[in-house]
Amino acid sequence: MMIRPIHLSFLVLKLTMYFLFTLLSVSCASISDESTHQLIQKESAVTRILLVNTNNSIERYRIAQTAFIETLKGSSVNTIDLGEDNQPVDTLQDLLNEQDYDAIYCIGAKALGTIDYIDPEAPVIFSSVLNWRRFSTQPNYYGVASEVAPEAQLAWFKYFFPEIKKIGVLYSDDNQKLIEDARSSAEKLYIQIVTEKVYSQDKLTTHANKLLSEVDALWLISDPSVLASSNNARLLFHNADKKQVPIFAYNSFFVDMGAMLSISADLSTTGRQAAIIVRNVLQEDMKGKSVQFPAGSSITLNLDKVRFYNIELNDSALDSVNEIVEE
């Protein structure tokens, strides 16, 4: 199949994308290595930070850890890897009993869940946690969301595939607010959000098949209640393939399952962003929401899926892609 260039008017879309890109650029610039290092140097005392990694052998966790440590040069960062630890609560409790820490940075759900069980007095900062919303209102907890802001994801979807009009979303009660915000953003992009609420896992296939028959594409959002297992995810992708409905995802690992496009958080930027949150919290200069959306993104496009679904692709968008997947 030939992927044809688009010759439509994208004035509204380009203005929207320009606005979003400008915001992201400003955010990324604010956490650059050089400026961050200068800010850290202003601290009068060495800070002691405990970094808890769910599994350092997982690349995305390791990248965030490296960026975090490099950003906080001058601080004392004690790292612990829970990858092979079957008693993480005991391990971390012993560490906290031996030494006081100014802040704790958790990478991944296992790390955050263990620390939350202990309930330390030090502020907790986290990243790479799918169910991050349950911690967004918890006192003394701060972090970086696991996915790019919904309005930015939708703008990217429209930029790449301007002919797509209806996007379906499976969601649970945990994401009711996200759905409301997404509808508002989608209207500005002339996209219709079609939703199907999932009340139980055994009804997932029924809800998914109903939704897939009504939409041009399916948008996976970060919702552990919807995709509670890898088997559920594989079944969802299988059903979408049968109905010729492409899937947009929030993480690149879904591309291996068959997603056509993923807009995921840039991992190095996430680590640096978490380091800045640590600094701001310790200096009592934390402004805005306690959990921030990632300041940088990484885009993966599966061209094989574009051809398979015979979807019209905006060739101009290819310059924005970080990774292209094709045979």
Image (cartoon, rainbow, N blue to C red):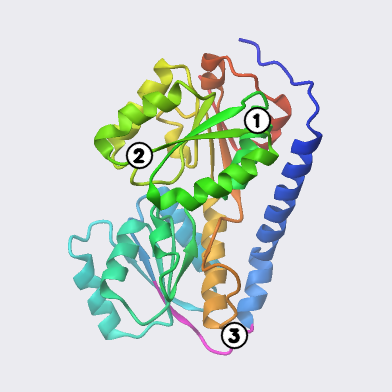
Distance in Å between CA atoms under marks 1 and 3: 44 Å
Report the amino acid beneath label 1: Phe
Q: Residue at x 61, y 52 (%)?
A: 296
Question: What range is drawn magenta here?
Answer: 42-50
Q: Which mark is residue 43?
A: 3
Q: Position of residue 164 (x, y in %)?
A: 62, 25
Q: Is residue 54 above or below residue 313?
A: below
User: Does 153 appear in magenta?
Assistant: no
Report the amino acid beneath label 3: Glu
Q: From where the camera sits, is residue 212 visible?
A: yes
Q: Nearer the viewer, residue 187 or 144?
A: 187
User: Does 47 appear in magenta?
Assistant: yes
Q: Position of residue 292 (x, y in %)?
A: 55, 61
Give the residue number, with chain letter if any, for mark 1: 160
Give the residue number, with chain letter if any, for mark 2: 198
Q: Position of residue 40 (x, y in %)?
A: 60, 78
Q: From where the camera sits, is residue 265 visible?
A: no
Report the amino acid beneath label 2: Val
Q: Residue at x 42, y 23 (%)?
A: 240
